[in-house]
Amino acid sequence: MKLMIRKDSKGTLTGYVPKKDLEEPIVAMVNPAMWGGLVTLANGWQFDLPAMPADTPLPITVEARRLPLAQDAED
């Protein structure tokens, strides 16, 4: 799934999913450098990001794998 990552005017990292027209702050990261690990959006969605250099310039659109939520598995 395409995920655009950017910093907003306050310096907060946000994730935008164009397919869903959804933009949410990134509230948790497994890796401090963000790349090559899981990030969690404020709505609970989790994405597995590709490995990239820590100094990758933002904004950037990447192909990230969305992990299913617990309620998605029950449906």
Image (spheres, helix red, strand yellow):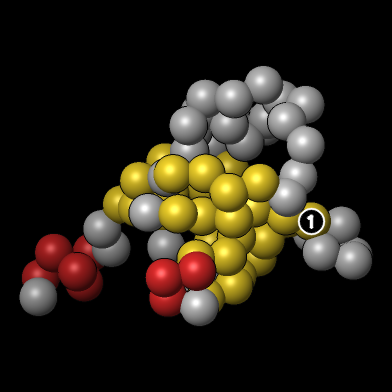
Q: Is residue 41 above or below residue 54?
A: below
Q: Residue at x 51, y 55 (%)?
A: 3
Q: Residue reaching furthest top?
A: 53
Residue 47 appears at what percent x and percent y? 43, 49
Q: Residue at x 52, y 44 (%)?
A: 62
Residue 32 appears at what percent x and percent y? 67, 32
Q: Residue at x 41, y 70 (%)?
A: 19
Q: Residue at x 10, y 70 (%)?
A: 74
The amino acid beneath tag 1 is Lys
Whether residue 26 is visible here, answered yes or no, is no
Q: Is residue 2 above or below residue 20?
A: above
Q: Answer left or right for 11 relative to 19.
A: right
Q: Residue reaching furthest right?
A: 10
Q: Answer left or right for 72 relative to 67.
A: left
**On the image, numbered disc 1 is attached to which residue?**
7
Whether residue 47 is visible here, answered yes or no, is yes
Which corner quadrant of the image does residue 41 belong to? bottom right
Residue 11 appears at what percent x and percent y? 87, 57
Q: Residues within 10 Å of mark 1 (few under 14, many from 20)?
A: some
Specify the quadrant that holds the C terminus. bottom left
User: Looking at this view, is 35 or 28 the one in front?
Assistant: 35
User: Looking at this view, is 9 or 57 the one in front?
Assistant: 57
